[in-house]
Amino acid sequence: MAVSWKKRLISQSDLMTLREKLKEKDKKIVFTAGSWDLLHAGQCRYLEEAKAHGDILVVGVSSNSAIKQVKGPNKPILDEKLRAEMLTHLRAVDFVTLLPEPSCAPSLGLLKPDIFITVKEDWTDNYKQSKEYKTVTKYGGEVVVVPRQSIAVSTTKIVQRAIGGHLGEVFKDFMELRKDPLKER
């Protein structure tokens, strides 16, 4: 089994060195971050869109503990190492780094990408007040907000559909009895 994907997994402590090597080659660095749980077409389109803004795309993957802090004890569904490896297999992604905390501002400060890409969501309306925006603009980088690449699919919708289908099977008999309560006797 090939483990070449591990060469594309960069530790936080190596982000400055990666930047120096890429800048020596005059490469334009793009960075984006997320949980990347249950990767779907919308996320893949988003990564392609992010890559189109530069030469090298570095993707931050929120650690298990960072996600739990933000989304609660039942997330993530997949382990951080699986999510990171999955991303390294995508054509648009050049490097992946695990983000130890909910904010990617420390990683942005180390890597100093030319462009930080984030997706337009309700919570990004005030993105100019975020730590990430302030970090990027302080060193002269650019923040680009792109629209969602799929409104029809999301990790949450995938999980809801899967659970809904399973619960439908579990409660099928119950629902039948509810239609005709006398059937139970």
Image (cartoon, rainbow, N blue to C red):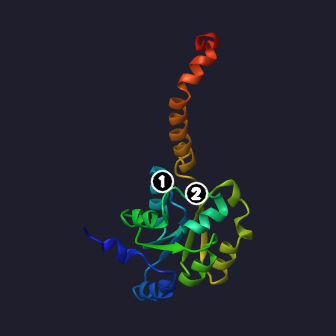
Q: In this figure, what is the number of numbered marks? A: 2
- Decide: is 58 above or below 26: above
Whether residue 100 is visible: yes
Residue 75 - label = 2
> What is the quadrant of the N terminus in the image?
bottom left
Residue 149, position as x, y percentages in the image? 52, 51
- Decide: is 81 above or below 185: below
Foreground: disc 2 or disc 1: 2
Which quarter of the figure has residue 184?
top right
Q: Is residue 129 left or right of residue 82?
A: right
Q: Is residue 168 left or right of residue 178?
A: left
- Judging by the rendered image, the residue that carries numbered circle 1 is 38
| 184 or 40, nearer to the observer | 184
- Callout 2, which amino acid? Lys
| 182 or 101, nearer to the observer | 182
Can you name the residue that lies furthest to the front here? 185
> What is the quadrant of the C terminus in the image?
top right
Residue 33, position as x, y percentages in the image? 55, 67
Residue name at image x 61 percent, y 68 percent: 66
| Dot 1: element | loop
| Dot 2: element | loop
Residue name at image x 69 percent, y 54 percent: 122
Does the CB distance between marks 2 and 1 fall below 8 Å? no
Residue name at image x 42 percent, y 87 percent: 21
- Callout 1, which amino acid? Leu
